[in-house]
């Protein structure tokens, strides 16, 4: 039985690791056209200022083993401590090496073959599936996992081809290379990618003005120092025990968690609402001062959004999902906060007057600044450009179906989707725990089909 994995980023690594641990027998073929096998879009070679956004306990690509990444990091952790966070935050290329090492171990056990081409179509071929690659070759498989990621930023403002426009900021080592230090830079977006751009400009000694321009003008929250507290109510088990899962039920779990610690959910919700109206720099300053605050509420949300959240999301009714989608910008900001070392750098730049944040997109256009950097990633469930033809073929062959709110869902038991292409997946971009959990679930389904 041949297993084909389309895409060789973090999702594929989580899947391969789970297949190897389950003792699944291959052969396995991975299709990946980029030169940075196992690293995907975020973790390829880049500047040292491009950091992971999450502490080690929630960066393990091995589902169910929170310590796997920290153990790999070992003594290297001391060189990369974010002192305010109390945990190492490494350059993303170093995390890419962890993914490479994990994948290579699993690949050796499974006997993986890598094909350095994109898959452009999957069709039915007798009782099997035929994968056609961009060079016209055809490969037969019995199980197919799609791990194609979310793709690159879209050109919402029609700026492609205008002088000074950078349509995709990564790798920043290349895109910022020719940005002279005194140039005026406008960054479209104010999320984590925009922050990567700003701290990388600063690390290169940029002296010109930088503005972050976005529809909401919201900055992500700042991580609080993780503590020993482990959630007792907001857990997968307690979500399952709810029976019918509703937003009110989930809110009840968080309320109970916080009440036990003497905290009020209402105060946290008020703080979240403030993101729409409060001055983003004032919020940043307050959150930076609150990294060591003793409250557990936001810490529980930050962690469980990526661990319990994806599980709960799949059990929620459509009306509750719609309520949550209306909050997606705030939810993304609290679930995927910035690391303190970046927050401190940002605040220095705001305080010096070099950096500003602009709410509203009216000023975005050609020649809005010397350099305009697009830092708005596609939302979850987007179909990456490099997988558009592939997705169309899967739908044509009734192997997958478009999901009403975007993305695809499998329509054949031999097809599996790991990562943000999964239409029934969460409304916020998956972190590593989310793709690792999906990889483990796909490995179980593939294992069951092969026995
Ligand atoms: C800039 C950035 C930073 C991030 N930082 C963090 C972080 O610090 N912590 C965290 O938890 N999460 C982070 N994330 C979230 C991120 O989504 C996950 O960490 C993870 O990288 C997703 O992996 P993936 O394999 O699904 O997608 P990707 O990493 O995008 O990999 C998909 C791969 O599929 C390949 N592919 C696409 N189409 C085809 C095709 N037709 N045929 C063959 N191959 C194809 C692509 O070349 C690519 O290599 C970050 C995301 C981004 C965009």
Image: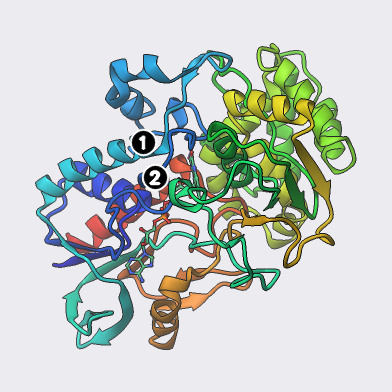
Residue plotted at (82% across, 59% down)? 363
Q: Assess mark 1: CB under 8 A from ligand 1?
A: yes
Q: How many marks?
A: 2
Residue plotted at (60% across, 34% down)? 202
Vertical comparison of 377 with 253: above or below: below
Q: Earlier in the sequence, mark 1 or mark 2?
A: 2
Q: Assess mark 2: CB under 8 A from ligand 1?
A: yes
Asked which quadrant contains residue 129, the reply is bottom left
Q: x and y percent of residue 61 in the render?
A: 35, 39
Q: Is residue 63 visible?
A: no
Q: x and y percent of residue 419 in the render?
A: 44, 56
Is residue 10 shown left or right of residue 201?
left
Vertical comparison of 302 with 179: above or below: above
Q: Quadrant of the C terminus?
A: bottom left
Residue plotted at (11% across, 61% down)? 27
Circle 1: element type: helix
Residue plotted at (25% across, 70% down)? 117
Asked which quadrant contains residue 240, the reply is top right
Vertical comparison of 9 with 158: above or below: above
Q: x and y percent of residue 246 in the render?
A: 70, 48
Q: Is 102 or 110 nearer to us in this picture?
A: 102
Pointer 1: residues within 10 angstroms few (<14), some, or many (20+)?
Answer: many
Question: Do callouts 1 and 2 mark residues in contact (Cβ within 8 Å)?
Answer: yes
Report the colour scheme: rainbow
Vertical comparison of 441 with 295: above or below: below
Pointer 2: residues within 10 angstroms few (<14), some, or many (20+)?
Answer: many
Q: Is residue 349 visible?
A: yes
Which residue has dot 2 on it? 43
- Residue at mark 1 to residue at mark 2: CA–CA distance: 7 Å
Which residue has dot 1 on it? 95
Is residue 280 shown left or right of residue 250?
right
């Amino acid at each position: 039985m041949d297993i084909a994995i389309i895409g060789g980023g973090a999702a594929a690594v989580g899947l391969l690791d789970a297949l190897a641990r389950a003792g699944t027998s291959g052969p396995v073929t991975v299709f990946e056209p980029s030169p940075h096998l196992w690293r995907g879009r975020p973790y390829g070679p880049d500047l040292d200022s491009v950091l992971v956004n999450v502490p080690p306990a929630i960066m393990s690509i091995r589902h169910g083993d929170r310590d796997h990444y920290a153990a790999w990091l070992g003594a290297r952790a001391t060189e990369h401590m974010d002192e305010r966070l109390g945990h190492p935050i490494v350059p993303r290329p170093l995390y890419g090496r962890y993914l490479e090492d994990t994948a290579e171990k699993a690949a050796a056990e499974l006997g993986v073959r890598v094909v350095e081409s994109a898959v452009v179509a999957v069709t039915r071929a007798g009782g099997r599936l035929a994968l056609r690659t961009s060079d016209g070759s055809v490969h037969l498989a019995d199980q197919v996992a799609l791990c194609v990621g979310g793709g690159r930023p879209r050109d919402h403002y029609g700026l492609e081809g205008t002088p000074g426009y950078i349509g995709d900021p990564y790798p920043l080592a290349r895109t910022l290379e020719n940005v002279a230090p005194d140039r005026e830079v406008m960054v479209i977006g104010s999320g984590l990618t925009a922050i990567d751009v700003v701290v990388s400009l600063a690390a290169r000694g940029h002296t010109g003005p930088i503005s972050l321009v976005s529809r909401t003008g919201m900055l992500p929250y700042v991580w609080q120092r993780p503590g020993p507290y482990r959630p007792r109510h907001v857990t997968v088990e307690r979500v399952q025990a709810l029976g019918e899962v509703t937003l009110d039920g989930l809110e009840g779990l968080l309320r109970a968690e916080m009440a036990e610690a003497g905290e009020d959910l209402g105060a946290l919700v008020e703080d979240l609402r403030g993101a729409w109206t409060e001055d983003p720099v004032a919020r940043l300053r307050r959150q930076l001062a609150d990294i060591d605050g003793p409250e557990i509420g936001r810490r529980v949300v930050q962690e469980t959004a990526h661990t319990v959240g994806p599980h709960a999301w799949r059990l929620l009714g459509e009306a509750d999902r719609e309520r949550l989608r209306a909050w997606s910008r705030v939810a993304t900001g609290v679930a995927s906060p910035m690391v303190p070392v970046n927050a401190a750098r940002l605040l220095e730049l705001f305080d010096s007057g070099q950096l500003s944040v602009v709410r509203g997109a009216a000023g975005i256009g050609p020649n809005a600044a010397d350099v305009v950097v697009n830092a708005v990633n596609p939302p979850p469930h987007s179909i990456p450009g490099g997988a558009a033809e592939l997705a169309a073929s899967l739908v044509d062959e009734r192997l997958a179906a478009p999901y009403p709110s975007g993305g695809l869902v499998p329509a054949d038991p031999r097809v599996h989707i790991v990562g943000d292409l999964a239409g029934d997946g969460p409304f916020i971009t998956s972190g590593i725990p989310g793709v690792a959990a999906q990889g483990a679930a796909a490995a179980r389904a593939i294992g069951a089909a092969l026995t």
